[in-house]
Amino acid sequence: MEIPRLLDGRLKFRHLILVDALSRQGTVVGAAAELHVTQPAATRSLHELEDILGVPLFERRPRGVTATVFGEAFTQHARAVLAQLTQAGRHVTELADADRGTVVVGTHLAGSNVLLPRAIAGIKKERPHLTVVVREASPEALLLELEAGRVDFVVGRLTAPSDERMVRRKLYDESVELVVRAGHALVGQPHVELAELADFPWILPGAATALRREIEEFFSRNGVALPLNRVETTSFLTVRQLLLETDVVAVLPSLIIRDDPRLVGLRIPLDPIGHSVGLTTSAARTLSPSAQALIKSLEDIAWDMAPQGARGERDGGVPGETPEDVPGHTPGHRADQ
């Protein structure tokens, strides 16, 4: 029987790691630097892989490389293989020492200020030797990290339904508010118009985020131009410090200001802007015991935090979706963002 060409011994794990890095970096120089190899070595490995597959994976351009249709398809499979190997190694480690383990969670602004810290504090009481690694990035970057197995799951805003690659489950619904510092000149004013805020500096989410698009639509519906004096970031530490030290106006999830008397929401409703906060996991991977334990803590904290009508399904799924409807679901598997 003929051995498939990907299993004939020529394909190496370094080839899989390389295509992942090339896809993210967009240049051979960047991928080589990330992998701590020389540019000629990276180029040689790419040529080897393309010879094995018999198709071009990347188009060479003056400013970098762009994945071909073959490259996009192979990169997706390469990330899945790398993710499974990462998970296998950690699973064996946890079986060898049940009291220890590592869980890597990705997060962005929604969920990073209240929900995740409380969940981590809760799980550390039960499992003090569990290592929790938190990676903060944009939602788009975190999905790539999740796909490649560099994070176990993501907690934050849900912007899409579950599909064949990602399983998403709501924990609670959250509103969005215009926020300023407690000593801001606008605090306490009974009637504040959106147009009155145009002269103040603003903090807005990055241009690629779903919340940013909704904010732009909100300004457009109200006939007000998007503020020119603005900072764009999803880093909560940056947002909070700018709020406390300047007269900036920020768009933030309501839970972020609930326990901080130094921050105040303005009386300008942003309806219908709001979002569901939840969990995203890979549909193709089984969660480690450590990841499942942290997810259970997140579910418990979210259930206590959220208003009753804004809670998600406690035992999985999105509203109207049973666990059996979720792609990749297996009995007993708790999946998420």
Image (cartoon, rainbow, N blue to C red):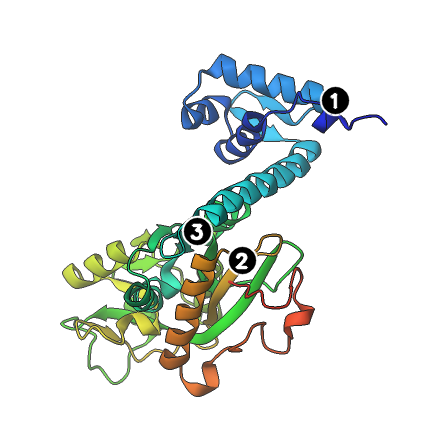
Q: Nearer the viewer, mark 3 or mark 1?
A: 3
What secondary structure is found at the residue carrying circle 3? helix
Q: Nearer the viewer, mark 2 or mark 1?
A: 2
Q: Amino acid at mark 3?
A: Glu
Residue 294 location (% of width, % of height): 41, 63
Residue 260 location (% of width, % of height): 21, 72
- For the residues marked 2 and 1, what is the alpha-carbon distance in whole angstroms? 33 Å
Q: Which residue is mark 1?
A: 54
What secondary structure is found at the residue carrying circle 2? strand
Few, some or many residues within 10 Å of mark 3 (<14, 14–19, 20+)? some
| Mark nearer the N terminus (3 vs 2) | 3
Residue 173 location (% of width, % of height): 46, 76
Say which of 197 and 104 sits in front. Answer: 104
Query: Farthest right residue?
Result: 1
Q: Amino acid at mark 1?
A: Gly
Q: Name which residue lies at 54% across and 28% down.
A: 18
Q: Which residue is mark 2?
A: 281
Few, some or many residues within 10 Å of mark 2 (<14, 14–19, 20+)? many
Q: Are marks 2 and 1 in contact (CB under 8 Å)?
A: no
Q: Name which residue lies at 54% across and 34% down.
A: 20
Q: Nearer the viewer, mark 3 or mark 2?
A: 3
Q: Amino acid at mark 2?
A: Thr
